[in-house]
Image (cartoon, grey):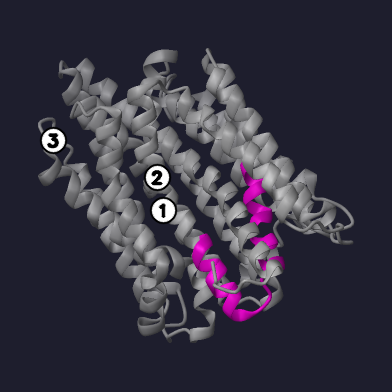
Amino acid sequence: MPTNQDPAERRRWLALYVLCMGVLMIVLDTTIVNVALPSIRADLRFSDAGLSWVVNAYMLTFGGFLLLGGRLGDLLGHRRMFIVGTLLFTLTSLACGLATTRELLIAARAVQGLGGAVVTAVALSLIMDLFTTTADRARAMGVYGFVCSSGGSIGVLLGGVLTRTLNWHWVFLVNLPVGALVCALCLRLVPGERGTHLPPRLDVAGAASVTAALMLAVYAIVDASQGGGFGSPRTLTLLALALLLFAAFVSIELRVTAPLVPLRLFRLRNLATANAVGVLWAAAMFSWFFMSALYMQLVLGYDALRVGLAFLPANLIMAAFSLGLSARLVMRFGIRRPIVVGLALAAAGLAWFARAPVSGTFLADVLPAMVLLGVGAGVAFNPVLLAAMSDVSERESGLASGIVNTSFLLGGSLGLATLASIAATRTAGALAAGAGNATALAAGFGLAFLIGAVCALAAATLAALLVRGSAAVPAGETADIRA
């Protein structure tokens, strides 16, 4: 916090920390749950493919309602919706923590994703409202970016500690005191505001159709590994229905006056490319978090705490880049080269994991891959966001950022479901051929990591061929890069 002792100034910075605390709770939720997945799987008797729904149910509603959450904030007031989203997230965390069946946990995670979407969508708007000068916004966005990146490190460690010392239920129950404190402090410190006149109508049909399409597609992919395979009539029918729903979404967006996603923006080359890159990269990265946690626990025999510590190098590297290293790289080398190099490093890290030896060691088989993935993600993430916003006007930069973030989340959910199903199918085939359990699991995880590496490499190739603008970015824009 700046040394300025003016009470109003002090209150603004305290309000920022409260908002960041709420965002941190959301960021924590992904990585803290990943570490607890094997314990959840054993306790609630999930299948390997079905376990991905603990992550997917959250991510799909989060991604599907992220843009709608922002529109609700514009209409009803940002502070009001931040508190509503935090309360919803906190109450559904309680439901997750008390869940005793697979169905209840997945349903609670889906509603929890809706609360997380609202909090995330309006938090940046509140920060922009609080800080109006360039210098203050730069510092505020630096704090926000650091929280988003460091949350991963905190999550894996906290998840390991809670799962080992207590049980998996506490990775959700820990949100209760944090959520209550955030709501109380938000009412006291964050100034309220009346909703604006924008937009007069909400695109509920658009949000509902695209979310239903994606959830149906993921269900079809997960179900394929438990049924007749990807070519079965059931799977093909479900995928066809998902395509019809997506076509309905496109039709809705072309007709409504205030669309959830203005399709005209995809005529912009960098924005369209950044979204395609985001889908491919997120499919690889979400699968990395999910599969590597299972590989270390089920094949290498790590407990939850050791898994959390194994993720620490990658998360610390990503946090360091969020504090300014990425911005300096973009200012020196432009947008395209950091994206290409970062994604290539991430692909190399996934290829290293694809070896997936049954008798692997941390120093030889885990740490090198974690370092490569940490550096790759740290280098590429902010330039991808910058590429998405580089062709749009200033008044639409927030919308462009929201669209590419949504692409990350939805691509990650679909990619995770697909690769988890492929891994389960490969594992089942290896078991049927007489392989031992650890060997069969390693074969499934190795194939998933290899496909993830191909996705990351394809994203790097797209960026190299299609992203325009290799010039360095003006210093005044570094706050946006860090955000």
Whether residue 103 is in magenta: the answer is: no
Whether residue 126 is in magenta: the answer is: yes
Q: What residue type is labelled 2?
A: Ile
**Residue under label 2:** 154
Q: Is 324 located above or below residue 38 in the figure?
A: below
Distance Cα–Cα, label 3 vs label 2:
28 Å
Marks 1,2: beta carbons within 8 A: yes
Query: Considering the numbered disc 1 on the image, is that residue within a helix, a strand or a loop?
Result: helix
Q: Give the quadrant of residue 446.
A: top left
Q: Which amino acid does label 1 sit on?
A: Ser
Instruction: Identify the residue shown where x is 47% and y is 22%.
Output: 169
**Front residue (pair 71, 317):** 317
Q: Could you tell whether 138 is left or right of 194 in the image?
A: left
Q: Could you tell whether 192 is left or right of 39 in the image?
A: right
Is the residue marked by circle 3 packed among few (<14), some (14-19), or many (20+) residues within 10 Å? Answer: some
Q: Main secondary structure of the magenta part?
A: helix
**Residue under label 1:** 150
Distance Cα–Cα, label 3 vs label 1:
30 Å
Instruction: Identify the residue shown where x is 21% and y is 43%.
Output: 354
Q: In which quarter of the image is the N terminus?
A: bottom right
Distance Cα–Cα, label 1 vs label 2:
6 Å
**Front residue (pair 357, 374):** 374
**Residue under label 3:** 357
Q: Is 461 located above or below residue 361 in the figure?
A: below
Picture coordinates of residue 438, whole percent (x, y):
18, 23
Q: Which amino acid does label 3 sit on?
A: Pro
Task: Note whether residue 86 is visible.
Answer: yes
Magenta stretch, residue numbers: 116-144
